[in-house]
Image (tube, grey):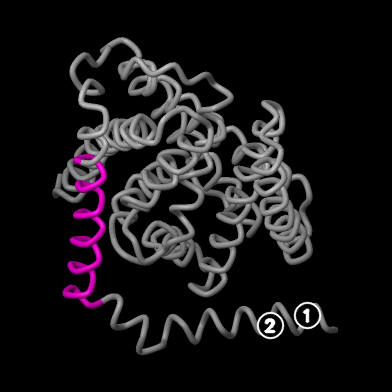
C-alpha cells in the first residue's frame, strides 16, 4: 500500500504542477524569452572563452568527420527516438505509425528549444489524441526519459572505470543505477510489460552510443585526440542537460558539463566545449531541414483537393 500511495502522490503532484501558478508563469512568453536569452548568452560566452583559450580549434576544421557525424549519427539518433516513442505507446496498448511518430518527434525536437520539458509535453499531447489522458502521457514520458538518464550515467560510469578513473566511474555508476532500475521497475509495475521495458532500455542505450559516436567525430573534426571511450563518458552531458528543464534543450548546460568532464579526463575543457557545440550545431541542422519538411507536408495535406 505504501508503494501505491507513493505513485498516487507523484501523479497528484504532477497534475498540481501543470495547474500551478508557477507553471503558468514559466509558460509566459516574457519568461521564456528571458530564460532563452540567458542560456544563449552563456552558450556564446562559453564559445568565446574556449576560442580564447585555444584559438587554433576553429582554424582547420576537418570536413569528413563532421559529415560522418551529420549524415550517420544524427539520423541514427532520430530514428532511434522515433522507435522509442512507438515503444512507449505500446506500453499504453496503443500503436503509432512510423510516419506519425516521426512527425511528433520532429515537433518535439523543436519544442525542446522552449523552457520546461517541451518535447515531453508534445509527446503527451500526441498521446492525448489516442485517448490517453494528458497526465498519464506526461507521467510515462517523464519515466521513460529517466531510463535514458540512468542508462547514460551507467554507461559513462562503466567507461570511466574502464580507463581507471575510479572515483568518476563509481560516482556516475552510483548515480545512474538507482535512476535506471527505479524508473524501469516503476514502469513495469504500472504497465506490466517487461518486454517493452527492456526494449526501451536497449533503445536508450543505443541512443547514448549515437551521442558518443557523434561527439567522437566532432573531436576528430577539430583535430582533438579524444578516443571513443572518452567521448562515451562525455555523452552523459545531454542527459544532465535534459534534467535542467527550465533551460531550452540544455543550451549551455550540456557544453559546460562536457567542458568540466573534459578537464577531468585531460581531453581539455575548451576542446570538449567546442566539440559539444559542433555536435549541437549538426543536430540542429538536420532537425531544421526535417522541421521544414514536416511543416510543408502538413500544409500540403491540409490543402483541398
Q: How many marks?
A: 2
Q: Please tell me which residue lies in front, 67 or 139.
A: 67
The image quarter in which residue 49 lies: top left
Residue linked to disc 1: 4
Q: Secondary structure at mark 2?
A: helix
Residue 264 image point, x, y percent = 52, 38
- Other residues around mark 2 within 10 Å, as few (<14) / some (14–19) / many (≥20): few
Q: Residue furthest front?
A: 53
Q: Residue furthest right?
A: 1
Residue linked to disc 2: 8
Residue 280 image point, x, y percent = 32, 37
Which quadrant holds the C terminus?
top left
Dominant SS type (magenta): helix
Looking at the picture, does residue 271 appear above or below residue 40? above
Looking at the picture, does residue 255 appear above or below residue 58? below
Residue sitting at x 18%, y 67%: 33
Is residue 162 toward the left or the right of residue 108 in the image? right
Span colored in magenta: 28-48
Q: Secondary structure at mark 1?
A: helix
Q: Which mark is residue 233?
A: none
Residue sitting at x 48%, y 44%: 237
Are the residues tagged 2 and 1 within 8 Å (C-beta)? yes
Residue sitting at x 66%, y 84%: 9
The image quarter in which residue 140 lies: bottom right
Residue 99 image point, x, y percent = 41, 39
Residue 192 image point, x, y percent = 78, 59
Amino acid at each position: 500500500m505504501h508503494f501505491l500511495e507513493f505513485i498516487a502522490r507523484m501523479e497528484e503532484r504532477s497534475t498540481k504542477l501543470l495547474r500551478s501558478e508557477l507553471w503558468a508563469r514559466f509558460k509566459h512568453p516574457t519568461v521564456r524569452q528571458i530564460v532563452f536569452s540567458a542560456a544563449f548568452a552563456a552558450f556564446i560566452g562559453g564559445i568565446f572563452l574556449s576560442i580564447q583559450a585555444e584559438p587554433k580549434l576553429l582554424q582547420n576544421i576537418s570536413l569528413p568527420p563532421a559529415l560522418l557525424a551529420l549524415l550517420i549519427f544524427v539520423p541514427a539518433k532520430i530514428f532511434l527516438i522515433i522507435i522509442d516513442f512507438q515503444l512507449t505507446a505500446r506500453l499504453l496498448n496503443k500503436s503509432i505509425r512510423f510516419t506519425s511518430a516521426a512527425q511528433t518527434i520532429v515537433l518535439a525536437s523543436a519544442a525542446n528549444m522552449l523552457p520546461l520539458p517541451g518535447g515531453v509535453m508534445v509527446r503527451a499531447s500526441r498521446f492525448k489524441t489516442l485517448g490517453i489522458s494528458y497526465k498519464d502521457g506526461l507521467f510515462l514520458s517523464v519515466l521513460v526519459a529517466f531510463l535514458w538518464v540512468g542508462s547514460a550515467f551507467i554507461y559513462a560510469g562503466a567507461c570511466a572505470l574502464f580507463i581507471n578513473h575510479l572515483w568518476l566511474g563509481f560516482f556516475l555508476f552510483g548515480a545512474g543505477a538507482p535512476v535506471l532500475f527505479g524508473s524501469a521497475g516503476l514502469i513495469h509495475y504500472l504497465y506490466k510489460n517487461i518486454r517493452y521495458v527492456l526494449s526501451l532500455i536497449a533503445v536508450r542505450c543505443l541512443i547514448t552510443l549515437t551521442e558518443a559516436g557523434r561527439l567522437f567525430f566532432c573531436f576528430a573534426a577539430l583535430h582533438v585526440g579524444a578516443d571513443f571511450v572518452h567521448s562515451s563518458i562525455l555523452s552523459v552531458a545531454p542527459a544532465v542537460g535534459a534534467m535542467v528543464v527550465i533551460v531550452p534543450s540544455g543550451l549551455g548546460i550540456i557544453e559546460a558539463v562536457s567542458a568540466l568532464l573534459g578537464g577531468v579526463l585531460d581531453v581539455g575543457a575548451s576542446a570538449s566545449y567546442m566539440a559539444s557545440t559542433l555536435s549541437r550545431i549538426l543536430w540542429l541542422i538536420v532537425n531544421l531541414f526535417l522541421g521544414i519538411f514536416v511543416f510543408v507536408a502538413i500544409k500540403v495535406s491540409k490543402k483541398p483537393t
